[in-house]
Image (cartoon, rainbow, N blue to C red):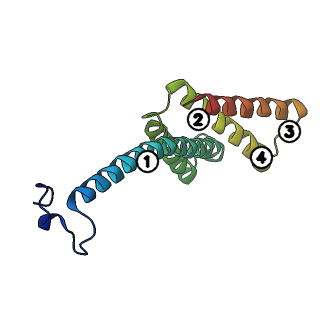
Amino acid sequence: MILAGPRENSQKCVHGRIKAWEIFFISRAFFVNNALYKIIERRKMHWIYLLIAGFFEISWAVGLKFSHGFTQIVPSVLTVAGMVASFYFLALALRSLPLGTAYAIWTGIGTIGTVVFGIVLFKEPVTVMRLFCIALIVCGITGLKLLTH
């Protein structure tokens, strides 16, 4: 009967300072603010899911090189696990993000990471044009992120 009506004695809390209807409105305001906060945080989580998916894409792309055409068992298993994880986190991100934007950013992260790992691990050539093209990909990813609500 806390919210039942304007009876003075039934509306006092333990300390006798706050009335029940005040508690009702305060808790309701907290719930609404908390719900909005969760929506905003959920939206941010989808970007984090997309980033994680991109990292897993890098892992399976590099894993393909180490698996030697799926002839090495451990790298092959890790590559397939990376593929599954990458698609899983991409699917989570797509719950909220636009398909075209999410896919472009996902492949962009994978492309940039794979090029960097290729240069570092496999001694692939570093040229000015190659770095310029990577910079263009970074600009495209940044633009898509900024233009997506």
Name the residue carrying label 1.
37
Where residue 51 appears, as percent x and y from the top left, is 58, 44
Disc 2 marks a residue whose amino acid type is: Trp
Could you say whether the residue bearing mark 1 is in a helix, strand or loop?
helix
Q: Which is in the foreground here, disc 2 or disc 1?
A: 1
Name the residue carrying label 3.
125
Above or below for 25 versus 104: below
Nearer-the-camera pick, 91 or 144: 144
Where residue 46 appears, as percent x and y from the top left, is 49, 41
Could you say whether the residue bearing mark 3 is in a helix, strand or loop?
loop
Disc 4 marks a residue whose amino acid type is: Phe
Q: Earlier in the sequence, mark 2 or mark 1?
A: 1
Name the residue carrying label 4.
122
Disc 4 crowd, CA 10 A, few/some/many (<14, 14-19, 20+): few
Nearer-the-camera pick, 34 or 27: 27
Describe residue 18's horizontal placement relative to residue 147 as left or right.
Answer: left
Could you say whether the residue bearing mark 2 is in a helix, strand or loop?
helix
